[in-house]
Image: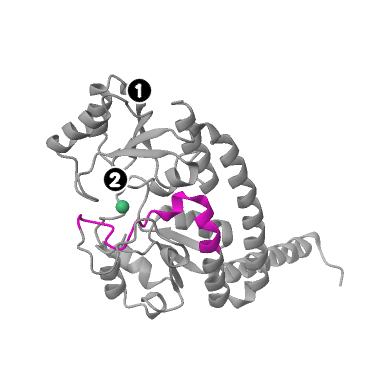
Amino acid sequence: MPRTRSDRRTARWHAALGGLLLAAASGAQALTVFTCEAEWAALVRELAPQAQVRSATHARQDPHHIEARPSLIAALRNADLAVCTGAGLEAAWLPTLQQRAGNPRVQDGAPGMVYASAQVKLIDPRPPGTPFEGDVHAEGNPHLHLDPRNLLPVAQAVTAQLQAADPARRADYSARLDAFTQAWRGRIGDWERRAASLRGARVATQHTTFAYFWRWLGVEPVADLEPKPGLPPTPGHLQRVLEATRANPPAAVVVSLYQDPRPAQWLGQQLGRPQSVLQLPSTVTEEAGTDSLAGLFDHLIDRLRATR
Ligand SMILES: [Zn+2]
């Protein structure tokens, strides 16, 4: 019996529907990845574009201190994999999330719990037995993502666990890692050339958020608006910073997007250089331009170059 036009349309519709169902089924198998910070979410998206990625914090939040909200507990409960910084950065909230989520895949020691700090050498490690002064960074400086070279070993470690959790896509993850590594090495070289004029520049900061970035580019942090790591600036400490920098003001006074910029603005005013105050994102944001890892480093270098 000859098929009518309507039959053919129905057949085409069934084929299309089958395709949709197939896509939905393979989508359902995509990994769910929880990250503590936005930089790791951005990295996971580079390495596993089909994964469902959720970051616990964003660029306008202080990653040392967030609330262990029920929505975050639920997100961690469903995660196949978690990527966090470690080195105590999330000490105030991640253990609570892990305990309440009760997800064995992402407890400490499980292969699905990836700590970036375990992949690199930290700045300012505290020698064993020395007293800890400050509120944060008891294990050394955890803000390692701001040296882009550190992202390469972290990408390798993340890829290994993506492959373990999702072996069907093993070859795909390897190819993505290779492409990322090659492109990222090229970008690092470009950034180092573009930032050559920053070598030797002096900056005042608030917290050691950008310590890895300064060290990478040969920028010299000469003052910290925080009296101790994690403690907010006090009038007495700011006055001392002013005295120490007045004769030779830094090229920039840098604060993070999540910090109150007023102490830095005060210092900039007192130094007669209000334009030197830069409020910079310390991680990937949701705004165009800094919504990717590469965009973040482009932006940081451009903003600092503009002060020279
Ligand atoms: Zn910190």
Of 67 and 83, nearer the camera is: 83
Rendering quarter of residue 168: bottom right
Place of residue 189 in the rendered image (x, y in percent of width and height, measured from the top left): 61, 44
Residue 140 is left or right of residue 188, and the answer is left
Give the quarter of the image for residue 166.
bottom right
Q: Which residues are magenta?
A: 133-155
Q: Nearer the viewer, residue 76 or 181?
A: 181
Q: Is 290 situated above or below 145?
A: above
Front one among 286 and 308: 308
Q: Is mark 2 within 8 Å of ligand 1?
A: yes
Disc with the residue nearer the chain's start (2 vs 1): 2
The amino acid pointed to by label 1 is Gln
Under circle 2, the secondary element is loop
In this rendering, does residue 285 appear at all?
Answer: no
Residue at 38% over, 80% down: 104
- Packing grade of label 2 (10 A; few <14, some 14-19, many >=20) is many
Residue 144 drawn in magenta:
yes
Residue 16 visible in the snapshot: yes
Label ID, residue 207: 2
Whether 150 is drawn above or below 82: the answer is: above
Residue farthest to the left, as pictured:
236
Residue annotated with mark 1:
275
Q: Secondary structure at mark 1?
A: helix
From this view, report whether residue 184 is shown above or below residue 94. above
Q: What residue is at 43 percent from the left and 43 percent from the top?
A: 214
